[in-house]
Amino acid sequence: MGERLNPVPAADLSDDDVRAALDGLRPLAVLPSGPAPVVDAARAVLRPDEPLEPGTDLVVVTSGSTGGGRGVLLSAAALRASGTATLDRVGGPGSWLLALPVSAIAGLQVLCRSLLAGRTATRPAEGETLAAAVARMPAGDRRYTSLVPTQLRRWLDTEPDALRAFDAVLVGGAAADPALLARARAEDVAVVTTYGMTETAGGCVYDGVPLDGVRVRVADGGVELAGPVLAHGYRGDPEGTAAAFADGWFRTRDAGTLAGGRLTVHGRLDDVVISGGVNVAPTAVEAALREHPAVADAVVFGRPDPEWGQRVVAAVVPAPGSSPGLAELRSWVADRLGAAAAPKQLHLIDAVPTLHTGKPDRRAVAARTPEV
């Protein structure tokens, strides 16, 4: 009948579970924490009652940021290749701080890298400061962590000294604003930008340069990846697998360019707002908005517009004590990106909701903001 999955709730995940998957002894899948609909949706993707595809040691549910989540099939060999190449790139074995959800590949890879290095990851307690968590890490060892840009921004604001304690701070999961990275480096934080996805067992391009064994090419403007870190398909989806994986290459849905062996990613191929015939990248507008002194965070998306085809909509978290208006933010963005990129609609929100991976949930923001 074939082996079946027994998904583990994130709160119950142990190092033994991860080690068994790394050793190819017992397949692993992790259910995200959260409300029942989120958990039920992940369980449906994982299909625990169906036989597992051969060669699978880990199934990870993607965030579904551009559609329904999928179950990505990874082998122990891919996990080990990714973990080993990462340790080689950042400076060798060390101790890791786990600051990301273990239901997503980035958090799981922190645990894998720790085990491959013969360590146990440090898990911050609920409500614990970053400095306190760092103080519990082994003394005299190299220290690493992996963050999404929102976490980097928050800790730069509150605990920059604790961030400086790491020999490498991997930043991925979403595009990091150039201004945020420049600020971190000015604060002597050893940030390393990472690009990758669940289908590549996590980050596989660091600061634009592929990890050892990873190959990158750009075809018709889209980024494609190959190497020992690749997944071998999607759970219960042979058609989707055939469309995304071919001849040893994975076709991402990201736009990019290669120059001098260095990859620059420009955003999703399908994540463009076309306003008045001009292509507008939401991530670029978000980055510009976050540079405004009255803006703490921002999410940008498009909505149908009878005059412009689509209009740029911004949902903004105001900086403390601020209440930015549409006119000033339109002018700010237009000066930097052109008039077409300037938001035509503004909503002030308390916080940016996130997916179980820690990425901003643009669809949730759009659903909660009025059409007006």
Image (cartoon, grey):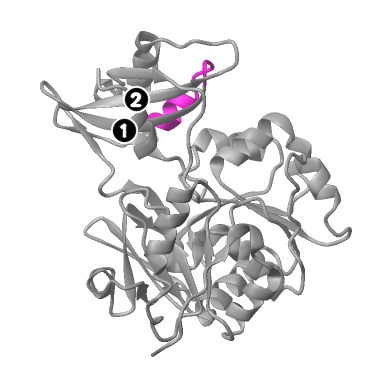
Q: Earlier in the sequence, mark 2 or mark 1?
A: 1
Q: Residues within 10 Å of mark 2 (few under 14, many from 20)?
A: some
Q: Position of residue 284 (x, y in %)?
A: 38, 34
Please provide percent x and percent y for residue 266: 35, 46
- Which residue is drawn at the image coordinates 45% and 85% (left, top)? 3
| Identity, as a three-letter code, of the amino acid under mark 1 | Phe
Q: Is residue 34 above or below residue 325?
A: below
2 vs 1, front mark: 2
Q: Which residue is mark 2?
A: 369
Residue at x 48%, y 45% (from the top left corner): 359
Residue 187 as seen in the image, left or right of residue 67: right
Q: Is residue 96 magenta?
A: no
Q: Amino acid at mark 2?
A: Thr
Residue closest to the far left: 306
* Residue 32 place in picture, x, y as percent: 52, 55
Where, quadrant-wise, is the N terminus in this rendering? bottom left
Label 1 sits on a secondary structure element that is strand
* Residue 111 against residue 312 in the figure, above or below: below
C-alpha distance separating marks 2 and 1 = 11 Å
Q: Mark yes or no: residue 90 visible.
A: yes
On-image quarter of the C terminus? top left
Mark linked to residue 204 = none
The reply to whether callout 2 and callout 1 are in contact (CB within 8 Å) is no
Q: Is residue 356 above or below residue 363?
A: below
Magenta segment range?
Answer: 285-295
Q: Please tell me in which quadrant of the rendered image residue 365 appears.
A: top left
Snapshot quadrant of residue 251? bottom left
Left/right placement of residue 277 relative to residue 185 reads: left
On residue 301, the disc is 1
In the image, 357 versus 274, the foreground residue is 357
Percent from the top left, x then y, of residue 192? 59, 52
